Amino acid sequence: MAHSNTTNFINPSTIILLGIPGLEAAYVWLSIPFCTMYSIVLLGNFIILFIVKIEPSLHAPMYYFLCMLAVTDMALSSSSVPKVLSIFWFNSREIDFNACLVQLFFIHCFAVMESGIFLAMAFDRYVAICHPLRHSTILTSSVVAKIGLAVVLRGSMIVLPYPFLVQRWHYCRTNILPHTHCNHISMVKLACGDTSISSHYGLFVLFCGKSLDMFFIAISYFLILRAIFALPTKEARLKTFGTCSSHLCAILAFYLSSFFPSFTQRFGQNLPLHFHVLIANIYILVPSMLNPIIYGVRSKQIRERMLQLFICASKI
């Protein structure tokens, strides 16, 4: 199929995803780490969900939020990686324009939801450490469910304008997207005319969806650290801080990987195109892969239960 850069149209029926421009010769080799990381995402998060379900001692707010995080991680990676692998393996570059909009919505929606879940987990740690006697009365099952619903609704409502904004622009130059998946910034760059509304709204989503969450997470940890340093012994301080270590590691993995592609897209014009695409894929895959590993290693209850499962499986 010949792909033209000079096609005249208002809205294309299909988008051509180029994959990672400049690295086409390495697609087979690139597919190995991509497929491996995606398998770890699915298997690791499924194990987390299974362990929390079968272990009654883990039926607590922190682990309910962890289950929400696991589902979001699987959904986020599944929104893009299968199409990436189909490009690598089968050169399947075409995607329907409406399917592209759906993919765009889900990728950004689940990313905002994940940020909201980290904020909810920070609130759980704050209550557990600063108000331990009231933890079970403050974070009841109904409150946890309401927080989860609020996270889903906020992510959906904030990102919902994205596909409508993208759909209203005219694409008079090309329908070729130099990327592995559809995302808001890349689609806006394809459009003709003044797209400042989309650019400004993208910054608004970045602020309301992640920056604001980071601000409240920082406040939560300021209060947590103040309570920890007020404890009488060093052992008590280390033990209490240890309950937050998994959450802190996961937060760093998510926010560092998410803000970097956003800023490189806007301010790293001199960087090679394949670097932007690889960073965007790392943002989707790496935190989702690391989260079950972090919680599996750092959480004693999950780690012990996971070892029991592996021992039982090895005996079969």
Image (cartoon, rainbow, N blue to C red):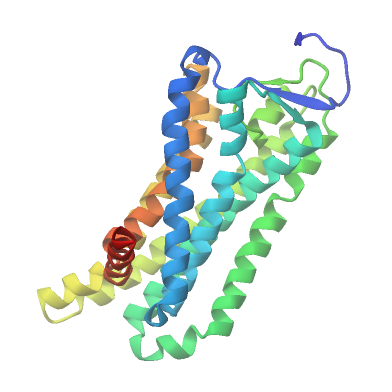
How many numbered discs, if any? 0
User: Residue 150: which quarter of the image?
Assistant: bottom right
Residue nearest the observer in this picture, 15 or 167? 15
* Residue 1 visible in the displayed image: yes
Q: Please say if 304 is above or below 22.
A: below
| Location of residue 12 (image quadrant) | top right
- Residue ranking furthest to the front: 316
The residue shown at (67%, 24%) is: 92
In the rendered image, residue 85, in percent from the top left (x then y), is placed at 56, 31
Residue 204 visible in the picture: no
Above or below, 164 relative to 194: below
Q: Residue 210 at x, y = what percent?
A: 53, 52
Please tell me which residue is depicted at 46% across the width and 16% down the height of the picture: 26
Taking 94 as reference, is 185 left or right? Answer: left
Residue 193 at x, y percent in the picture: 80, 23
Image quadrant occupied by the N terminus = top right
- In-front residue for pair 256/80: 80
Residues 16 and 210: in front is 16
Query: Taking 218 as reference, is 129 above or below it?
Result: below
- For image coordinates 49% across by 15% down, the residue present is 23
Quadrant for the C terminus in the image: bottom left
Residue at the far left in the pictured view: 234
